[in-house]
Image (cartoon, helix red, strand yellow):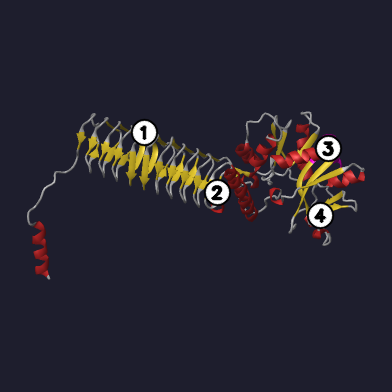
């Protein structure tokens, strides 16, 4: 990956690769697996910190020396031995698209066949880089050969090992003790289980899965992007099946945990990041970017809006070109218009902030009208201060509210005012310089200019 970040912490649909697998394994059956052991080596503490889950049966195993896949499994055996289990499923942390259905099918195949070892395979047009599955004349699996150990003839085989196995727990412990590192890399290969089983005349089963895209591991930025495209396709199609319209599905990006209600419409080039909940009958305009936000039913975002950490109770209309930052709440029928920015602002029912305004650290009542160019001056260079605006306040254009300050219910602020003191209920507040006129000033200037020519 050419990265300082551990590979399994690179994200797919906004979620670390390893967490995809942990959550999938946890959902494998109604009560989950008896235990899950995650073997970590390089930058183990960082991986464990990011991918920690509140799962009682999740154990972290540290592989102090990285001596191969079989060595990693061997490190986990003492932990697994503390929990009674019949079968062990082994996965690689860089195969995030493996889902519940695939693992369930593997487990069922393993138990129905009575095999001690069942491997999950697939076929690739270009199998370069993957271990090849070799079979005998009867179709039985006899060996798995890693790419770096394969001869030219073996490399022509298109069936590859996914690196996912279901193994009888008793045989697994025995085979881990017997595997050697007599190979080109001097590592302990998990694939040698197949050769040991064949030597011992123990049945080896296989499940060849047709959807190779779900079994491919990620070893480069290119493969990460390819996998992202596959997952994006599945996620968008899932929400369309739930009644959501995507006008241009291929142009949109949806996080793994995003949720969209039926009869909502998503325009082209929309990004729905992690922590997004969109209720039913919402409309999201083109080029909107939303993360960690809730949008209530009937809400409409016009194009080019950016929302992060917001709650729109709904129905609301926002945009175009609006930015709503963390802590912003819009009550029902509140309206935010073009080129407005809100931060940690609670906007009451039916209030309108329509043009070119900044509202930060503000409690605003209902029915307020905010004129164009209004600013809440919430920062004095050292501390943030709050502005409180009562119900039914009218704020004229180009007003500065210097916090901390309170504007009483029903008050009117004249356009162009700078408000530094509390405004009583129903009062008119003005802070303009008195307007004066100088008669004939303009004509005299023109005459002087002509004379100078």
Magenta-tinted stretch: 166-178
Q: Residue at (29%, 45%) from the top-left corner?
A: 372
Disc 1 target residue: 349
User: Where residue 411 sits in the image (x, y, percent)?
Assistant: 24, 33
User: Real-space Cα distance between discs 2 and 1?
Assistant: 31 Å
Residue that sits furthest to the bottom in the current view: 453
Of labels 2 and 1, the one closer to you: 1
Q: CA distance from mark 3 to mark 4?
A: 36 Å
Between the C-alphas of marks 2 and 3, the distance is 40 Å
Viewer-proximal residue, 270 or 247? 247
Residue at x 57%, y 40% (from the top left corner): 257
Does residue 225 appear to the left or right of 401 in the view shown? Answer: right
Label 1 crowd bin: few (<14), some (14–19), many (20+), radius 10 Å: many
Q: Secondary structure at mark 1?
A: loop
Image vertical order of residue 250 relative to residue 256, above or below: below
Mark 3 or mark 1: name the one nearer the start of the chain.
3
- Residue annotated with mark 3: 112
Which is closer to the viewer, label 4 or label 2? 2
SS state under label 4: loop
**Residue 6 seen in this snapshot:** yes
Which of the pair 204/10 is nearer the observer?
204
Image quadrant for the C terminus?
A: bottom left
User: Which quadrant of the structure image shows residue 85?
Assistant: top right
> Dot 2: what SS?
strand
User: Gap between marks 4 and 2, in whole Å?
Assistant: 42 Å
Q: Is residue 13 visible?
A: no
* Residue 276 highlighted magenta (yes or no): no
Give the left or right position of residue 256, taking residue 155 as reference. Answer: left
Residue, disc 2: 253
Tell me if label 4 and label 1 are in contact, CB under 8 Å: no
Q: Main secondary structure of the magenta part?
A: helix
Mark 3, residues whose alpha carbon is within 10 Å: few (<14), some, or many (≥20)? few
């Amino acid at each position: 990956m050419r990265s300082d970040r551990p590979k399994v912490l690179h994200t797919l649909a906004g979620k670390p690769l390893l967490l995809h697998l942990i959550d999938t394994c946890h959902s494998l059956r109604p009560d989950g697996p008896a235990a899950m052991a995650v073997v970590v080596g390089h930058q183990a503490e960082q991986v464990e910190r990011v991918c920690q889950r509140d799962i009682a049966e999740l154990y972290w195993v540290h592989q102090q020396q990285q001596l191969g896949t079989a060595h990693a499994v061997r490190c986990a055996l003492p932990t697994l031995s503390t929990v009674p289990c019949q079968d062990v499923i082994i996965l690689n942390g860089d195969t995030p698209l493996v889902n519940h259905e695939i693992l369930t099918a593997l487990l069922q195949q393993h138990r129905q066949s009575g095999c001690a070892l069942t491997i999950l395979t697939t076929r690739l047009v270009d199998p370069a880089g993957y271990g090849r599955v070799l079979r005998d004349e009867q179709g039985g699996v006899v060996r798995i050969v890693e790419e770096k150990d394969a001869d030219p003839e073996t490399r022509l085989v298109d069936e590859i090992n996914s690196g996912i196995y279901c193994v009888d727990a008793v045989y697994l412990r025995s085979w881990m003790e017997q595997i050697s590192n007599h190979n080109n890399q001097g590592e302990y290969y998990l694939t040698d289980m197949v050769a040991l089983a064949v030597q011992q005349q123990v049945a080896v089963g296989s499940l060849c899965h047709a959807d190779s895209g779900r079994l491919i591991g990620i070893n480069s930025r290119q493969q990460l992007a390819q996998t992202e495209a596959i997952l994006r396709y599945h996620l968008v199609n899932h929400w369309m099946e739930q009644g959501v319209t995507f006008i241009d599905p291929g142009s949109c990006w949806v996080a793994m945990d995003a949720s969209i209600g039926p009869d909502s419409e998503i325009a082209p080039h929309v990004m729905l990041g992690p922590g997004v909940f969109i209720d039913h009958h919402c409309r999201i305009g083109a080029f909107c970017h939303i993360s960690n936000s809730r949008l209530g039913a009937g809400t409409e975002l016009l194009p080019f809006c950016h929302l992060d950490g917001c709650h729109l109770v709904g129905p609301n209309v926002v945009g175009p070109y609006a930015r709503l930052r963390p802590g912003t709440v819009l009550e029902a029928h509140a309206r935010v218009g073009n080129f407005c920015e809100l931060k940690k602002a609670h906007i009451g029912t039916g209030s309108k902030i329509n043009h070119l305004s900044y509202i930060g650290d503000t409690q605003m009542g209902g029915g307020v009208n905010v004129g164009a160019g209004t600013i809440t001056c919430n920062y004095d260079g050292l501390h943030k201060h709050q502005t409180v605006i009562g119900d039914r306040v009218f704020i004229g254009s180009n007003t500065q509210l210097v916090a901390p300050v309170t504007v009483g219910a029903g008050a009117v602020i004249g356009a162009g005012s700078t408000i530094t003191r509390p405004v009583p209920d129903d009062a008119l507040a003005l802070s303009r310089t008195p307007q004066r006129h100088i008669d004939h000033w303009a004509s005299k200037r023109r005459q002087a200019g002509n004379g100078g020519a």
